[in-house]
Image (cartoon, rainbow, N blue to C red):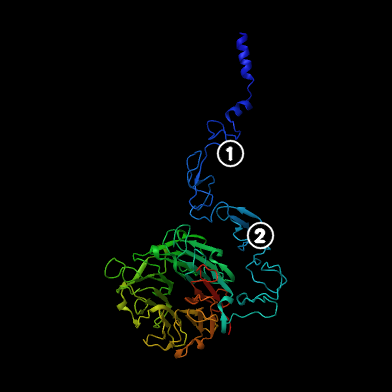
Amino acid sequence: MSLLIATALSCALISDDDLAARWDVDGDGAARPQDCDDLDPTVGAARVWYADLDGDGFGSAASSPVCEGPAGYVPEGGDCDDNDPLTSPNLVWFIDADGDGWGGTETTRSCTQPDGFAAFAGDCDDVDATVNPHAHESCDGRDEDCSGVADDPGEAEVCSDRLDNDCDGVVASCAVSGQARLDEAPAIVHGADLAPLMLVAGVGDLDADGKDEVVVASSRAHQGWESWSGLVTVWSGPVQGEATVEQSPVQIYGTDANEVLGTSAAGADIDGDGISDLAVGAAGLNTVFLWFGAPVSGTSGGAEIGVVASVEGFGQSLANAGDFNGDGLDDLVSGATSSAGVNGNEPCCGAVGLILGGDPADFWVDPIIMGDEEYSYFGEEVAGGADIDGDGLDDLAIGAPGGSGAAYVFLGGFTGTLHPADAAVKFTGSGGYSLGSSLALFDDTDGDGFAELLLCDVTYTKASYYLSPLSGAASTTLADAGYGFGYAVGNAGDVDGDGRDDVLVTDPYAIGGDGKSDGAAYVFFAPLAPGSLTPTDAGGTLIGPNGGDQAGQAAGGVGDLDGDGFGDFYVLQQQDTVNFQNSGEGWFLYGGPG
């Protein structure tokens, strides 16, 4: 009996701490047999590891618990986009109390942008949305731009804000006249390394605030590892200051490789609610995406409707077709340069289709015009929204710049399927100059009751034509003033407020002060005089910045961004030597009284 008692007393002398220590020799809190190495306090129990596809230190897909992580796995999860090394739970966001897109000093970390936070810091008054680093200074005793100086006499004047920025007692006008430099424009948007600028388009007033919006897009943008998925950014007017596409308040990404979201864009009130709707082409999906009213950041999958065509490349070009069929609603016209033509299903001859306004549930592509000539690129350029023959229906202009090129006018109201031979007028290029590579329609600029059509050729440009009405003969031509004069043309809108749309003509090869092809854009105020025009006849000349980056690869109107009643316009270059990234720049110019 005494032996049994002694044994019991001996067992009672081992404490819980002693027992735990015997099972956890290295004291790391993981006991055998769960501890992967009980002699190394830096190695604990088996744990879950996460596949880190983008190498940012955070993973997404989890493994089963193991002692050592497989190659390419990390201990931290929670990555909301494991294809983008710039996106992780370690992203810093700044509290944005006034909702102006700029935050103060308080931060949080999150994989996605939390409500009430901004991606950029530097707001010196985060309870006043008119104060932030991108605001313009005005002569009112406040430091609006967070520069540390109020009422700075050296502040640059910004014509589009209608304020006295430099306290000289004069509010600058946006009137276009004489010669100016594009790098002094009141608003400049840059592309990014993985999002080179390819497109700018006016899209009307999406949010019913009296100021139009504009799209700046990169169909070649990369989202994560998805190459050429595309990026569309939407900017609310008035656009002011200097920014990159990554700073846009609305960013819409394509979701698939080679989706090329943003090959085209336009605005039209196709549902008849009085507010412009956003249409964006994704030629890689043969689709035009539609947002009714102002979109929010996201992906193309967030569109209300994707109108898919049976023709390959639908969405390559896009324009507001005005009221094509006379029902009182806006319509859209879109081109597909590589779609199958009458010869079969192989990529061939191009096509142009219409999306007629009405009930969104019934949107589809009809009527359609099928190209019938190989390598004509029929539909590469489209324009609408103007009544060329004066019958009350808006008509279409279509470019087919393959070879020497051609351009066609189709009168509004047709149904079914047509072909180029059905055009009311055909203009044929000569000498391999790609007629129809750029074109623009204008409302009645000369008071004759008809709309006008301006055509040019983009390759080895030699001439452009200004036609009114369907005479088939040019009333005004652009002189052979150099290698690139007439490279691109556009409708600038009513820049000078005289009630008539004005004409944009570019020359990306114009020689600047540095002796390089800096490029230029010219504004010709309507009405254009009959005869031959040269750059010296322009009412305003806008010179590209130094560096030989060929400003003026595209140009056109963007509506009325600042709500002052004058037409505003853009000039685009798709290269940017200054940033050494080929990212491109879009300059925005504001109209005003002459």
**Residue 140 appears at what percent x and percent y?**
71, 72
- Figure quadrant of residue 417: bottom left
Q: Quadrant of the C terminus?
A: bottom right
| The disc label shown at residue 20, or none | none
Which residue is disc 1 drawn over? 42
Left or right, 550 with respect to 378, comes to: right
Q: Residue furthest right?
A: 141
**Residue 313 appears at what percent x and percent y?**
37, 66
Q: Nearer the viewer, residue 74 or 456?
A: 74
**Proximity of marks 2 and 1: CB atoms separated by less than 8 Å:** no
- Figure quadrant of residue 360: bottom left
Relative height, residue 97 to residue 315 (above, below): above
Left or right, 265 with respect to 127, comes to: left
Q: Residue furthest front?
A: 39
Q: Residue furthest top?
A: 1
| The disc label shown at residue 104, or none | 2
Relative height, residue 209 to residue 28 (above, below): below
Q: Secondary structure at mark 1?
A: loop
| Residue type, label 1 | Thr
Whole-angstrom CA distance, mark 2 to mark 1, is: 39 Å
| Residue type, label 2 | Gly
